Amino acid sequence: MQEIAGYRAIALDIAHRIVSGEFSIHAKISGRSLLASHYHVSPETIRKAVSLLKDENIVSVSQGKGIFVTSDQQAHDYITKNNYMKSVYSLKQDLELLLLEKKANDHKFEAILKDIIGFSDRLQNLKAYHPVEIQVNPSSHAVGWSISNLQFWQKTGGTIVALRRGTQVTISPGPHVILQENDVIIVVGDGQVFQRTEEFINNTTL
């Protein structure tokens, strides 16, 4: 038989052997030396295991005579109690793992919530500026003019934050960028910025 670590495990195994009938009531169990050889442990470990069984009134120990089985019912109760304790211990371990997972998930939740609040705050700040897209029509008077020469901000109250030309996007184009037909400008401003910019850019006359 493979070595069973710990005197409690040995005591439990002996209790199982009693309940199964391998050791009958009042039968003498092998001496400590033989048990130590059977379980591949020291006689001291066997002494602790037997002492545990004696305390549970499963066996009796007679000096010089040996170890005797006194109750298979007590052995059964001992097994049941240990199975219950093992279940409780297992549940405790599961609970500890769940608590660790919960703690990790709480940290993730807090980080995500913080990000959401940060994004929400930034969106809230941007909301007042109403970013809009306006395409420069081929017939627009603005074609061929620079942003500076158009006096874009003075005429519209808006700020061009990006310009899309075909597949190219320019972030924060400078005042000297010349508008071309079909350019798309992204403008931020107040609630009326779209109307003012659309009228200004796509008006065919200066």
Image: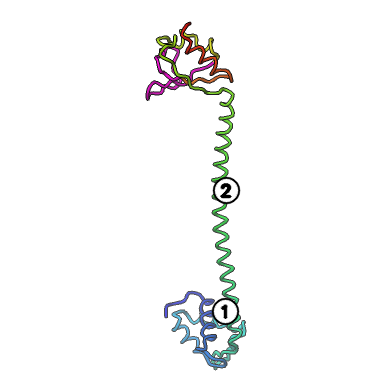
Residue sitting at the far top: 206
Q: Residues within 10 Å of mark 1 (few under 14, many from 20)?
A: some
Quadrant of res 40: bottom left
Q: Residue at x 53, y 79 (%)?
A: 12
Question: Magenta region: which residues?
Answer: 158-184
Q: Which residue is mark 1?
A: 79
Q: Residue at x 59, y 20 (%)?
A: 191
- The three-letter amino acid code for the residue at tag 2 is Asp
- The three-letter amino acid code for the residue at tag 1 is Ile
Depth check, front residue: 134 or 151: 134
Q: Secondary structure at mark 2?
A: helix
Q: Is residue 133 above or below residue 107?
A: above
Locate residue 46, reporting x and y percent.
51, 81
Depth check, front residue: 122 or 4: 122
Residue 171 lies in the magenta stretch = yes
Q: Residue at x 57, y 59 (%)?
A: 96
Depth check, front residue: 137 or 38: 137
- Which of marks 2 and 1 precedes in the sequence? 1
Q: Which residue is mark 2?
A: 106
Locate residue 123, reporting x and y percent.
56, 30
Give the number of the disc on residue 58: none
**Quadrant of image for the N terminus:** bottom left
Residue sitting at the far left: 167
Residue 7 lies in the magenta stretch = no
Locate residue 98, reporting x and y percent.
56, 57
Locate residue 116, reporting x and y percent.
56, 37
